[in-house]
Amino acid sequence: MDELKKEIKECIVSSLELEDVTAEDIVDSEPLFGTGLGLDSIDALELGVALKKKFGVKFNAEDKDAKAHFASVDALAEYISSQKAGEK
């Protein structure tokens, strides 16, 4: 799971072209939006596309839990892991 979280953080930094943030700066449990990393709704869309390309997972904006999946790196890792487990 730690490797997955590292890949997610690298994906966040590269896909959103964060200039003053490195993957090591992102805390797994810290919120990605608002007070945490400070991402916004446009970032969420770009990140969703990047994660879909990298990990092959889909995010549905209509899903009531979609916002929760993007709450933190921990939440994204849980969601991606569960999607990957469902494919097997």
Image: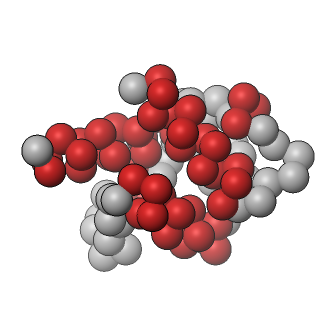
Q: Where is residue 84 in the image (x, y as percent from the top left)?
A: 24, 46
Quarter of the N terminus within the rendering: top left
**In this orientation, which residue lies closer to the viewer: 16 or 53?**
53
Left-right relation of 2 to 32 = left
Q: How many numbered callouts?
A: 0
**In this orientation, which residue lies closer to the viewer: 85 or 37?**
85
Please say if 3 is above or below 36.
above
Which residue in the rendered view is the most extreme toward the right?
20
Q: Where is residue 37 in the image (x, y as percent from the top left)?
A: 71, 46
**In this orientation, which residue lies closer to the viewer: 18 or 72?**
18
The residue at 63%/51% (across/down) is: 12
Please say if 41 is above or below 87.
below
The residue at 37%/74% (across/down) is: 61
Can see residue 53? yes
The residue at 47%/23% (across/down) is: 2
Left-right relation of 60 to 12 = left
Q: Where is residue 67 in the image (x, y as percent from the top left)?
A: 43, 59
Q: In which quarter of the image is residue 28?
A: top right
Name the colour scheme. Answer: secondary structure
Quarter of the C terminus within the rendering: top left
Q: Where is residue 27 in the image (x, y as percent from the top left)?
A: 64, 30
The residue at 28%/68% (across/down) is: 63
Q: In which quarter of the image is residue 52?
A: bottom left
Q: In which quarter of the image is residue 77?
A: top left
Can see residue 44? no
Left-right relation of 75 to 10 = left
